[in-house]
Image: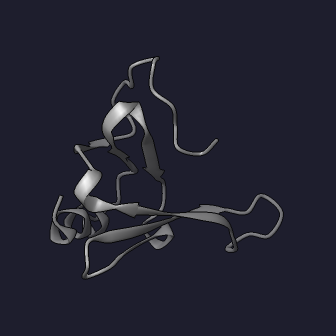
Amino acid sequence: MAPADVLAWLRVRPFRPFRMVLPEGLVYEVRHPELCMVTDWGGAVVGYSSETLEGAVHRHDLVSLSHVVRLEHIDQPQPAAQGNGEG
């Protein structure tokens, strides 16, 4: 997946939360546009908000966009066999 493709999803207004689907059912959910940064070398940093300090990032994952199979809106059903990337 090209960085520009992910940036396009992040820039849609109003923002719609989406997930990045990777092989073997791994997914990363992007619930706020401020919690995902896309690099020019084809990576994305996906952050997860802190439950104790609003506006702070609790943890983050580095995702290689070359492994992203597709993007889909979170309001679409997700097959039960897949994880959520937040475990």
Image quadrant in which you'd find residue 21: top left
| Location of residue 46 with respect to 85 vertically, above or below | below
- Camera-side residue: 14 or 38? 38
Percent from the top left, x then y, of residue 14?
32, 61
Judge left or right: residue 43 versus residue 60. left
Considering every residue shown, the one lying at the far right of the view is 52
Q: Which quadrant: the C terminus?
A: top right
Percent from the top left, x then y, of residue 83?
51, 31
- Residue found at x 25% / y 82%: 40
Judge left or right: residue 25 versus residue 7. right
Percent from the top left, x then y, of residue 80?
46, 17
For the image, the number of numbered tags is 0
Considering every residue shown, the one lying at the far top of the view is 80
- Camera-side residue: 11 or 3? 3
- Residue found at x 25% / y 63%: 6
- Camera-side residue: 33 or 14? 33
- Residue found at x 26% / y 71%: 42
Percent from the top left, x then y, of residue 67?
28, 51
Image quadrant in which you'd find residue 77: top left
